[in-house]
Amino acid sequence: MKIPTLYLDTSVIGGAFDDEWKDATLELFRLASSGSYRLVTSVVAKREVEDAPPRVRQQFAELFADPAQVHLLTDEAESLAHEYVATGVVTSKYLDDARHVAIASVQGIAVIVSWNFRHLANLRRETGFNAVNLLQGYPQVRILSPLELIHENEDEDL
């Protein structure tokens, strides 16, 4: 069985050190280390963590030790990110959030993981990103919080 690939935005990396999000974030990392998921990110997240506290930068380095896990911001992804802005999915102030979604979309990564409920992990934004993706010929994406993913992996007594 193919291991699902998850694109992590910057909020998830920092979430390992946030009291509210720590438990779910660390459980997601544990699931990935046990082989349930393959984690990837991008140079956008790498740039964003450069100004973060040392422990966040260290977490990033540990999670994404293989350079193949860190996707580039291609011209194609940059163009798609600007299309998200042009259609009002997000404003230009949040272009990096659009870049995260665009990189994942161009790479065919179906699930983006984020604690950013305002600009990414909410139904209105997901619908907007997917409307643009559909019109531009890119696959649909899901934008979920780590909490949603770890609950999906719990055994259920049905």
Image (cartoon, helix red, strand yellow):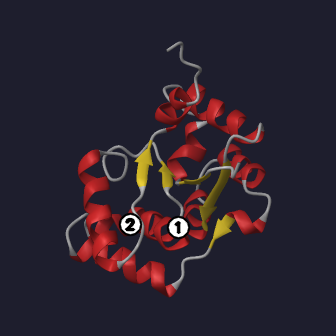
Q: Which residue is mark 1?
A: 108
- Which amino acid type is marked by label 1? Gly
- Which amino acid type is marked by label 2? Ala
Residue 90 in view here: no
Residue 108 vertical placement versus 20 (above, below): below
The local secondary structure at tag 1 comes to loop
Q: Please, which residue is most extreme toward the bottom here?
A: 75
Identify the residue shown where x is 50% and y is 70%: 103
Do the residues under discs 2 and 1 have CB atoms within 8 angstroms?
no
Q: Which residue is mark 2?
A: 98
Q: Residues within 10 Å of mark 1 (few under 14, many from 20)?
A: some
Question: Label 2, label 1: how many angstroms apart (C-alpha)?
Answer: 15 Å
The local secondary structure at tag 2 comes to helix
Considering depth in this image, is 74 or 96 the residue closer to the camera? 74
Q: Which mark is residue 128?
A: none
Q: Position of residue 61 (x, y in %)?
A: 75, 54
Left or right, residue 146 beside residue 30: left
Considering depth in this image, is 57 or 95 the residue closer to the camera? 95
Q: Position of residue 152 (x, y in %)?
A: 52, 31
Q: Position of residue 38 (x, y in %)?
A: 68, 51
How many discs mark residues in the rendered view? 2
Between circles 2 and 1, the one closer to the viewer is 1
Q: Residues within 10 Å of mark 2 (few under 14, many from 20)?
A: many
Nearer the N terminus, badge 2 or badge 1? Answer: 2
Identify the residue shown where x is 41% and y is 49%: 143
Q: Position of residue 71 (x, y in %)?
A: 62, 70
Identify the residue shown where x is 79% and y is 62%: 66
Identify the residue shown where x is 58% and y is 23%: 154
Residue 29 in view here: yes
